[in-house]
Image (spheres, rainbow, N blue to C red):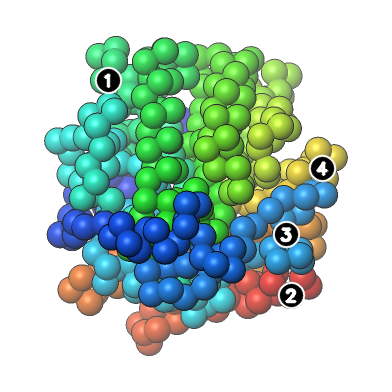
Amino acid sequence: MNDQPRTTRRRTLLGAAALGLAAAPLLGGTASAADQDRKGQDGQGANGQGQDGSGKGRSSFVTARGGELRLDGRTFRFGGTNCYYLHQQSHYMIDAVLNDAAAMGLTVVRAWAFADGDGHSYRALQPEAFSYDEAAFDSLDYAVQKAGQLGLKLVLPLVNNWPDYGGMQQYVSWFLGLADDSYGDGTNHDKFYTDANCRKAYRAWAKHVIQRRNRHTGLRYADDPTVMAWELANEPRCRSDKSGATLLGWAREMSAYVKSLAPRQLLAVGDEGFYGRADEADYPYSNYEGNDWLKLTALPAVDYGTVHVYPQNWGETSGSKPGTDATSWGTRWITDHLADGRKLGKPVVVEEFGLQIDAGRDIPDTAARDAAYRAWTDAALASGAAGDQFWLLTSRVDDGSFYPDYDGHRVMWDNDPANPTRTTAQLFAAHAKAMAAGR
């Protein structure tokens, strides 16, 4: 998630999260050769399904066909969430949030599969280009195992548009030594898409993650049905080329490459849904960010389209634009994409959405936010979304307290009388049940 340039930057708050909660000690070790041999050359058990480290059978791969997602021969629709920090935290914290997700009836969780650049507050998975810290993968490996045991699916983006956890700017810094302008005009940032060394390093990172063997399950990531989908990036933007051609060319190349590495898993771009229209003044529909959602989603290797919904951060409120309401604008944004997805013949997932309680931006209290979330999830259900994932579910940290509300979007499951998001969590739990039932 991020906002348009004229508003408060929320990504810096997530950077503070990395500073405030250091990663727990990480465990080494890998599955034994004998264990790997028993699972077979492709990492599958005798029944053709993945297994976790305990030998428990896992579900099948999710597929995309005929404009919908499918699992085990049936339409697969889901209510889900995001929890970006799974790749950095302790087993206790991973257990806490994934157990809560399962208790809510959520079925898909999106989490980061990147941490680029040494010398930061986080434990880097890729300290330097082409160099990978295998011990640092323990948290992500464990999260995949835990999700599989709970019957959850994961969506894993491979790089961040934003400098949190390194991101595209880290690649630009490694090879070109240019300053970070991710929140500016993007001239330096956007060289990530065109510089040959940046592209080579990204491809190497994708290959390493997708083909490496999980120390806890013994499976290669590409062979594990728990990983529902890979995403090329979290919220890729290219402001320096408003035609959309640069980002589209990069996405065409990398989507084909990632799909070749993980042909049984789904692939999405991970973009926000900006339409890229040169003649449109309304920011999210305009070409300001150099994205063209229709063309990105239509790429042959892309299995489904992604949509993010942040009207407050994009200036779509009554205070910024008289006559506009954040809730109704978000509903229109969702239904527009779902209608266009049907025309493309591709499933669409509303994979990030959120509102802050802020009376000056149309959401005065929890009741108003719940009403907005209900309107959006009802629209997703009624208009045929393959799934939706609110930003963000958090739970307990290592000392037993709740994860801090760094960005004003935190939702916690109904597990404490003092939980201020109790009604919101109950709303999402009921919605997930309705999505699973297809009604």
2 or 1: tag closer to the N-terminus: 1
Q: Amino acid at mark 4?
A: Gly
State the residue position of label 3: 70
Report which quarter residue 401 is drawn in. bottom left
* Residue bearing mark 4: 345
Q: Disc 1 versus disc 3: distance between alpha carbons? A: 41 Å
Q: Is residue 2 left or right of residue 267?
A: left
Q: Between tags 4 and 3, which lies in front? A: 3
* Secondary element at tag 4: loop
Q: Establish if 159 lies above or below 425.
A: above
Determine the residue positioned at 47% across, 19% down: 193
> Residues at badges 2 and 1 in contact (C-beta under 8 Å)?
no
Question: In the rendered image, which residue does mark 1 sit on?
Answer: 173
Disc 2: which residue: 437
Q: Residues within 10 Å of mark 3 (few under 14, many from 20)?
A: some
Q: Residue at x 19, y 56 (%)?
A: 28
| Left or right of residue 159, residue 337 in this image | right
For marks 4 and 2, the one nearer the N-term is: 4
Above or below — where is 154 with respect to 277? Answer: below
Is residue 199 or residue 83 the one in the foreground? 199
Q: Identify the secondary structure beneath mark 2.
A: helix
Q: Amino acid type of disc 1? A: Ser
Query: Which residue: 14% across, 35% down?
Result: 119
- Gap in Å between the C-alphas at discs 2 and 1? 48 Å
